[in-house]
Image (cartoon, helix red, strand yellow):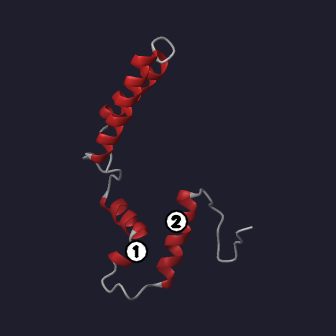
Amino acid sequence: MRPTHFISGALAALLLVSFTSLFFNWQIGITGISLSIFGIWIASVTAKEFKVSTVAQLAEKMTRENYLASRRNSKTYNKNEIEKIVHEWFSNDLYLNNLNRESRFN
């Protein structure tokens, strides 16, 4: 879940303005930075929008992050699915696209 773009943009603008005002009046700058960081934290905790836009993306994300919990029988697994999920982790999170079974970590 993520906050709406309007709220995120407004809080980012407040953070930028507060950082700029830090050089002119440090009390107002520190107060604004504190409020914007607190607002970003509150916005992320009370978020109401999905980061994914389709059901397929949601299913892939759930499987990638909670593979065993998404299985009907959590004591079994499919080696081909695990290989696909690990490949997706490395390609999506670490931006390593040229992976195969023989790839080394060196």
- Asked if residue 4 is positioned above or below residue 27 in the image, the reply reads below
- What residue does disc 1 label? 67
- Asked if residue 1 is positioned above or below residue 29 in the image, the reply reads below
Q: Residue at x 33, y 52 (%)?
A: 53
Tell which tag, 2 or 1, sits nearer the viewer.
Answer: 1
Q: Residue at x 38, y 78 (%)?
A: 68
- What residue does disc 2 label? 88
x, y percent for residue 48? 24, 47
x, y percent for residue 37? 38, 35
- Asked if residue 28 is positioned above or below residue 73 in the image, the reply reads above
Q: Quadrant of residue 10?
A: top left
Amino acid type of the residue that numbered disc 2 sits on in the rendered structure? Glu
The residue tagged with tag 2: helix, strand or loop?
helix
Looking at this view, is 58 or 1 the one in front?
1
Disc 2 and disc 1: Cα gap in Å? 13 Å
Q: Quadrant of residue 32?
A: top left
Q: Residues within 10 Å of mark 1 (few under 14, many from 20)?
A: some
The residue tagged with tag 1: helix, strand or loop?
helix
Q: Residue furthest front?
A: 27
Looking at this view, is 71 or 34 the one in front?
34
Amino acid type of the residue that numbered disc 1 sits on in the rendered structure? Tyr
Task: Evaluate whether residue 3 shows in this view.
Answer: no
Mark positioned earlier in the residue sequence (2 or 1): 1
Tag count: 2
Q: Residue at x 43, y 68 (%)?
A: 64
